[in-house]
Image (cartoon, rainbow, N blue to C red):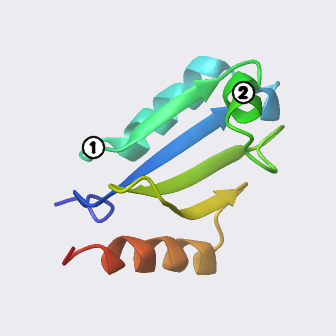
Amino acid sequence: EHPIVNKNIAIYGVINMAAAPMIPQKLIINRALKEVSGNENQIYVDPKELISKSWHLTGANQNFAIIGVSKEGVIDFYKTGQLSSADQADMFNVIHKYENN
C-alpha cells in the first residue's frame, strides 16, 4: 500500500501553475500524476489561481499547497511550497494518526 493512503484522511495537492511560468504545464502535470500514482489522493491544477483564491489558501498564490483533510472535514495538515524533510515527517505523522480511526 502507498505510504500516504489512509481511508480516514485525504491528501490533496493544489498546483498553482503561475508559480512556474517557464515550465511547460504538461511537464508539471505529468510529474504530479507520477507522484500520486498508486494512491487515491487528488492533485488539482490551478492555472489562474482560482482554487487558491476561492478556497482562501493562505500562501498558495504563486506556490503549491498540500492539504490533509480528515473524513470529518477537518484540515489537519496544510503546507505551501516545497516540503522540507521535517514537513514530510509532519505529514506522515498526521496520516499515521488516523490509521486506527
Give the left or right position of residue 1, taking residue 36 as reference.
left
* Residue 53 found in image quarter: top right
Which residue in the protein does label 2 denote? 17
Task: Look at the picture and state if 16 lies above or below 5.
Answer: above
**Quick one: which residue is furthest to the front in this view?**
72
User: In the image, what residue type sits under mark 2?
Assistant: Met
In what element is the residue under mark 1?
A: loop
Which label's residue is closer to the chain start, 2 or 1? 2
Q: Residues within 10 Å of mark 1 (few under 14, many from 20)?
A: some
List x then y, in percent, for residue 76: 51, 66
In what element is the residue under mark 2?
A: helix
User: In the image, what residue type sits under mark 1?
Assistant: Glu
- The quarter of the rendered structure image containing the C terminus is bottom left
Looking at the image, which residue is at 67% across and 36% down? 55
Q: Residues within 10 Å of mark 2 (few under 14, many from 20)?
A: many
List x then y, in percent, for residue 46: 66, 25
